[in-house]
Image: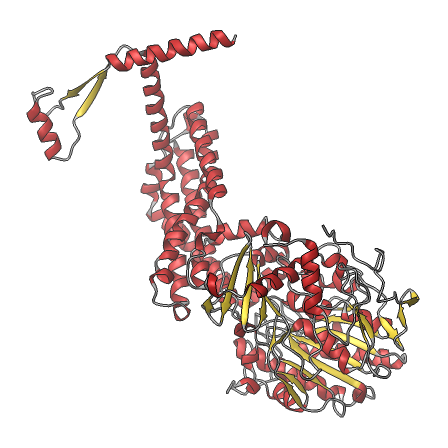
Amino acid sequence: MQRLQSEEQITFAANLSHCLATTTVDEVSDSRGPNRGSASQTMRSISSRRLPKLKTRHNCPDIQLLRRLAMTFAQSVGAFFRRLKPFILLFLLTQFLVRLALSLVSAKDLSFHPADWLVPFFTGFWFDIVTLLPILVVFLLFPLLLPVSWAGKRFDGAVGLSGFAIFLFLMVVQGVSEYFFWDEFTTRFNFIAVDYLVYTQEVIQNIMESYPVVPLLAGIGLLAVGGAYLLRRQVKAGFAPHPPFMKRLAVFATVTGMAAAGVLVTPDSITRPMPSAIARELGGNGLYGLVSAFFSNEIDFANFYRTMPEKQAAERTRDLLAEDHEPFESTDLNDITRDIRAEGPMLRKNVILVGMESMSAEFMGTFGNPKRLTPNLDRLASEGLLFTEMRATGTRTVRGLEAIALSVPPTPGQSILRRPGNDNLFTIGSVFQDSGYDTRFLYGGYGYFDNMNAFFSGNGFGIVDRATMAAGDVHFANAWGVSDEDLYDEVIRQADASAKAGKNFFSFVMNTSNHRPFTYPAGAIDIPSPGGRDGAVKYSDYAIGELVKKASAKPWFRDTVFVFVADHTASVAGKVELDMNKYHIPCIIWSQGFVEPRRINRLASQVDIAPSLLALLQASYRSRFFGDDLIEADEPERPVYISNYQKVAMILHGRTTILEPKKQIVQMKGEEVQPENAVDHNAVEDTVAVYQYASHWRDISRRIPSVLDNGTRALGRSGVHRLPNPKRRAPPSRTTPTIPVP
């Protein structure tokens, strides 16, 4: 059989060579001249920029067949291109205009460098083509399945024109949506947009209250219908009879292959050379980013980020966390449990910790804002403990809650609140629960949003949210949640219940009023609702003042510590993608008669809040926190963690080391990217080590009995436990994580 195939191949090759050798090419004159094949005719063709017509004369059936197939395929491609040409041009024009509009609204954050203004349009065009090809595959399904006898007829034209009107409508909606998304997050569509698609009801309601949706959609609908009518001849011109099914199938398969190849060969890193974060965002495509985010919501650290041997990562992480007065319980590299010992018993103060939605430090008069939007927070900052250089670990509420509750660095991808296996972890609530406190999570919205209820209930907190509040206790609400005043009234009611039962309480509160649609109760402040960002900030501050005033009338007030800290800033937009100044948030600890006025100017992040609060209360406990006690004086500089979607960073010794997907690392000093010869490689190794180690959060942050009694026993929900001898290596157990160490 193999020999027969070889003979057939040799025969075919010989015939083909003979055909090529005997093939002649003659010039054929057109109807305008009698000189067939003459030199003058050739010169006239060249001078008029028209190629002479050629005719191939041969007696080779194989070449004739190939020629017929090529011509048929070209005709099929041409027929499909004419049919899809209006759709292709519409898509490319829409994406260009969206990119241009976003560039213009961000002009103040772009330099005059050509890379900021020109390169995004070139890379963006590539992403547009890669995004367009899969869309064309969908469009080709209709002519592929349409019977030949129907092609070019009334039904075909009606469907095509209707499809063009719908596509025009969708393209304009996409452009408008991208504009508003950019206005909120200064990015193209990403996994935030994916999350919004998951929580459709809340998001749609919020959008309906934040924007004039009905007039916008009505206007876009009229534009789509009018545009399709004006372009009806151009659209219908391409809807002519098309080739037989097999020829259409060949074109469909080719375009499908091109679409797959385009996605496979397009690296996200092609926007990397651009000098600014905004330019890199402009150089992408929103639809491409949306689909990409859908398939990469949770990121495997080892597959996408720079790593080192697990043993080395554990050693470096323990070295960064080590302090003389906080000894490790074990020499096991897989365990970061440390004994935090205070002099004397714990001060059993109640705690109300308020997470303030989108409260950037720049909104406060304390940090130089002249608008007097935050008189209450400014007063509390002057009377209490103010952390002047606090940084948010991320750009979303779930990141802030994660850092405050767990005191862990922001590992890439989704917040731990949204990942599976996030129950029974060591949190700030663990210490209070083991000390006999009532612990609650109170949220102004619906707590199933962003998986908040599941996370906090899985870690021992009671849940109070909009769904559990009595209807009579809610006097104002919008799509995002009840008013901050209504929320704080519920906080006081829950505190009263704990006090009446003779129990201390730790209330973890998350407000919502400083969020779109920026609406709030009428008459509360001098800016009418909806008052935009300024109005929402001022109302949020007003409600905090009311909380403190109402709480001051309660018997538990003088034994209560208030913590006010933002979940994240209102925006991190800027020329630098991870600029620590864009993550600046307020953090205030206030308690009348207990906390003295003081400013702590150390650079810190939200992971440091839990250790600092527990230090203030003189708690002795076993810790698995990554954060540091900021109350201690003369402490050396410690790591500060920030993140932005899929990029995470550690700030240490004036340098920001950024870990990016595809195992890329960038180090910055201020706003300048450091060249290779100026990189602090120790900082790089420390950053890789900490984030790699933290990626094992399910093990290293597993809950353990926490409270130390006189430094000898650990008291928890399971009773009394003897501490292991710190000089001996602790054996693996449920409370000792088992990260594989090579």
State the image coordinates of residue 674 (x, y, percent, origin top left): 47, 65
State the image coordinates of residue 684 (x, y, percent, origin top left): 57, 62
Identify the residue shown where x is 59% and y is 60%.
204
Across the whole image, how many numbered discs are drawn on residues? 0
Q: Check the image and name the residue furthest to the bottom.
A: 593
- Tell me if residue 41 comes above or below residue 534 in the rendering: above
Specify whether 202 is left or right of 274. right
What color scheme is it? Answer: secondary structure
State the image coordinates of residue 284 (x, y, percent, origin top left): 45, 54
**Residue 395 in view of the camera:** no
Q: Check the image and name the residue furthest to the right.
A: 720
**Residue 297 in view of the camera:** yes
Residue in the foreground of this view, choosing between 344 and 57: 344
Identify the residue shown where x is 44% and y is 23%.
246
Identify the residue shown where x is 51% and y is 10%.
2
Residue 502 location, quadrant: bottom right
Specify whether 127 is left or right of 468. left
Residue in the foreground of this view, choosing between 415 and 516: 415
State the image coordinates of residue 280 (x, y, percent, origin top left): 45, 59
- Tell me if residue 302 comes above or below residue 622 in the rendering: above
Residue 630 location, quadrant: bottom right
Residue 619 location, quadrant: bottom right
Specify whether 21 is left or right of 406. left
Identify the residue shown where x is 63% and y is 61%.
202
Specify whether 509 is left or right of 212. right
